[in-house]
Image (spheres, rainbow, N blue to C red):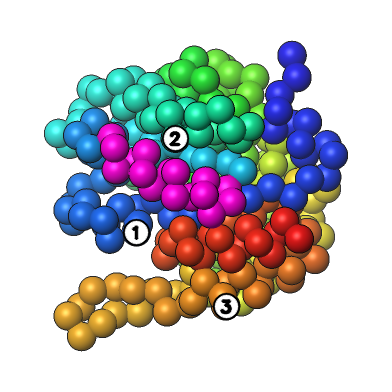
């Protein structure tokens, strides 16, 4: 069966993913200490409103608000035991936001929130099962692709791919956050990411979040020289700064971010968007530059 995401990739089409979920929801009133998944259940209209704002800004792909919705990630919170419900509801909200538009829904899967052994308490098979449960919920609810994002550990990324492939044949994006500049917190470089994952039935390799825009561009260039797979690129809107009240903010303007998009495309990205700090206004400038 053909998949719309795969078909678009094959034609070489430049696609625009959405912007930040967390930072935008916090600006819209999500209390600190809560996650977007709380609002999936309690204020679904706010999730739909943000997704529609990204669609109006030019997004071709909307990610579900499920970054923290694996069973392990929800463990110990007030949402424990509700992973299936949250993932299903989040997909339905994304579909509601899209309506009849020919856009794609990506099922967001984030890290488990625990390090794998020997660095932490999480066993590999437990991790595989955790992510298989989330991937199956997202697949059955009707996403077009799965987006494994903000990864930092090659072993966890491999466990996620194993879990996904036990339950789903959907295209998969595996995207890493280089939050130490040109390495992840576990020391992974872009070239290592490509060498370790590109032969593991992954569709797209990617970079998201991370540090400065300049560092992320350097990472993109290294990744492009290391793989022939399509590349997903959703950097932060620069590094956060702190105002006089101690609140973080992102100083990179929408115009500044949009002006960088031609460099991203020239460096080899096929899907572009933005992570933390990327508002609908930022995304509008990204989309305008990407769709020229």
Q: Of helix, strand and loop, which one carries label 3?
A: helix
Q: CA distance from mark 3 to mark 1?
A: 19 Å
In the picture, the disc for residue 23 is: 1
Q: Is residue 78 magenta?
A: no
Q: Nearer the viewer, residue 225 or 43?
A: 43
Give me the residue at 56% from left, 60% from top.
Answer: 284
Q: Which residue is mark 3?
A: 256
The residue lying furthest to the bottom in this view is 244
Q: Earlier in the sequence, mark 3 or mark 1?
A: 1
Give me the residue at 80% from left, 66% from top.
Answer: 266
Q: Does residue 106 lie above or below 59 as drawn?
A: above
Q: Position of residue 5 (x, y in %)?
A: 69, 33
The quarter of the picture where the C terminus appears is bottom right
Q: Is residue 177 visible?
A: no
Q: Earlier in the sequence, mark 2 or mark 3?
A: 2
Q: Position of residue 254 (x, y in %)?
A: 52, 71
Give me the residue at 34% from left, 59% from top.
Answer: 23
The answer to the question of whether label 3 and label 1 lie on touching residues, with beta carbons closer than 8 A, is no
- The residue carrying pointer 1 sits among few (fewer than 14), some (14 to 19) or many (20 or more) residues within 10 Å by Cα, namely some
252 left or right of 40?
right
Q: CA distance from mark 2 to mark 3?
A: 28 Å
Q: CA distance from mark 2 to mark 1?
A: 19 Å
Per the rendered image, the range of residues in magenta is 44-59
Q: Earlier in the sequence, mark 2 or mark 1?
A: 1
* Mark in front: 2 vs 3: 2
Q: Does residue 175 lie above or below 106 as drawn?
A: below
Q: Which residue is mark 2?
A: 97
């Amino acid at each position: 069966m053909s998949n719309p995401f795969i078909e678009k990739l094959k034609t070489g089409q430049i696609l625009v993913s959405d912007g930040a979920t967390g930072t935008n929801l916090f600006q819209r009133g999500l209390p600190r200490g809560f996650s977007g998944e709380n609002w999936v259940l309690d204020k679904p209209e706010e999730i739909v409103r943000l997704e529609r704002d990204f669609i109006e800004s030019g997004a071709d792909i909307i990610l579900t608000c499920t970054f923290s919705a694996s069973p392990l990630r929800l463990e110990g919170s007030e949402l424990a035991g509700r992973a299936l419900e949250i993932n299903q509801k989040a997909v339905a909200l994304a579909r509601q936001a899209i309506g009849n538009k020919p856009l794609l829904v990506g099922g967001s899967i984030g890290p488990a929130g625990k390090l794998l052994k020997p660095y932490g308490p999480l066993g590999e098979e437990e991790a595989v099962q955790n992510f298989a449960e989330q991937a199956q919920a997202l697949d059955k609810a009707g996403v077009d692709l799965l987006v494994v994002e903000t990864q930092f550990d090659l072993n966890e990324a491999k466990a996620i791919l194993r879990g996904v492939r036990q339950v789903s044949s959907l295209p998969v994006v595996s995207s890493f956050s280089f939050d130490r500049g040109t390495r992840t917190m576990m020391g992974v470089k872009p070239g290592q990411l490509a060498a370790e994952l590109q032969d593991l039935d992954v569709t797209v390799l990617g970079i998201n979040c991370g540090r400065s825009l300049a560092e992320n561009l350097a990472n993109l260039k290294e990744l492009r020289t290391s793989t022939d797979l399509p590349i997903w690129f959703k950097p932060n809107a620069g590094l956060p700064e702190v105002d006089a009240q101690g609140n973080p903010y992102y100083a990179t303007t929408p115009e500044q971010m949009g002006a960088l998009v031609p460099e991203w495309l020239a460096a080899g990205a096929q899907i572009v968007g933005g992570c933390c700090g990327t508002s609908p206004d930022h995304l509008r400038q990204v989309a305008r530059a990407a769709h020229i």
